[in-house]
Amino acid sequence: MTLLPRLYAIADASFGDPAGLAQRLFDGGARFIQVRNKNAGPREFFEQVERIVKDAPRDATVIVNDRADIARITGAGGVHLGQSDLGVSEARRILAEDQIIGFSTHNFEQALAAGALPADYIAVGPIFPTSTKLNVEPVVGLEALAEICASVQKPVVAIGGIKLENAARVLAAGATAVAVISDLLSASDVRARVREWIEVLS
C-alpha cells in the first residue's frame, strides 16, 4: 500500500508557472506534489516536469497529471490519471516498477471499480463545490466519501473545495490525504500557507 502524507498539493498551471509553484510548495514543506498543466503542449509540459523533478527535495514525490510517458522519462514518482485518460493497466505497463499510479473517481461505483485496477491510490471528488475545474462532476459530499473509504482497500485522496477549515471533517470521513489547490496557491504567501496546512493536518 502506498504511503501518502496527509497533504497532497497540486501545482496547477492556472495559478502560474508550475515549476515556480512547486518550488514554493516544497519550500513550505509539501512532500507530495502533483503537477498539472492542462493547456501545455507535450514539450512544454515535459520541460516543466523535468525541472520540477530535478529541483525536488530528495524526500519528495512528484506526480505527473495525465502523462505516463512523461512520468517515465523524467523519473517522476508516478502519474495521476482521470476517467478519460490512458487506462490504468496501460499506464502500469509504461511506468517503472517503483512508480505509482493515482486514479480519479467521482462516485461510489467508480471508486469500487478502481479497487480492482493496478492503481496505488484512488482520488475521490469533488467533495465540496469547487471552481478549479471546468465541467465539474456532481459533488460527492462527506457521507458518500465515508462510504467509499469504508468500502475500498486502497488509500483515498479527497479532492475538491477542501479548505483548512473543513479538512478535519474530510479526514474524519476516512480519507488518507486531502488534495489542495486553491487554498494553497491563492494565498499571498504559499510557503506559509503550506506550513499552516501541515500543522493542522499533523
Image: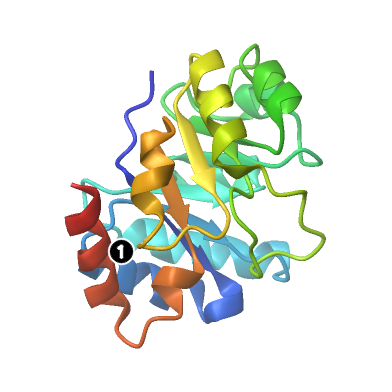
Residue at horizontal 36%, vertical 62%? 165
Protein image colouring: rainbow
In depth, the one of 65 and 69 nearer the eye is: 65
Is 138 left or right of 13, judged from the image as shown? right
Above or below, comparing residue 185 to residue 87 in the picture: below
Task: Report the residue marked by disc 1.
Answer: 55
Q: Amino acid at mark 1?
A: Asp
Above or below, comparing residue 76 to residue 18 in the picture: above
Residue at horizontal 28%, vertical 49%? 60
Is 186 left or right of 42, judged from the image as shown? left
x, y percentage for residue 104? 65, 38
User: Picture quarter containing residue 26?
Assistant: bottom left
User: Picture quarter containing residue 37?
Assistant: bottom right
x, y percentage for residue 197? 27, 61
Residue at horizontal 57%, vertical 23%? 147
SS state under label 1: helix
Res. 53 visible in picture:
yes
Residue count near mark 1 (Cα–Cα under 10 Å), binned few <14, some 14–19, many ≥20: some
Residue at horizontal 62%, vertical 45%? 125
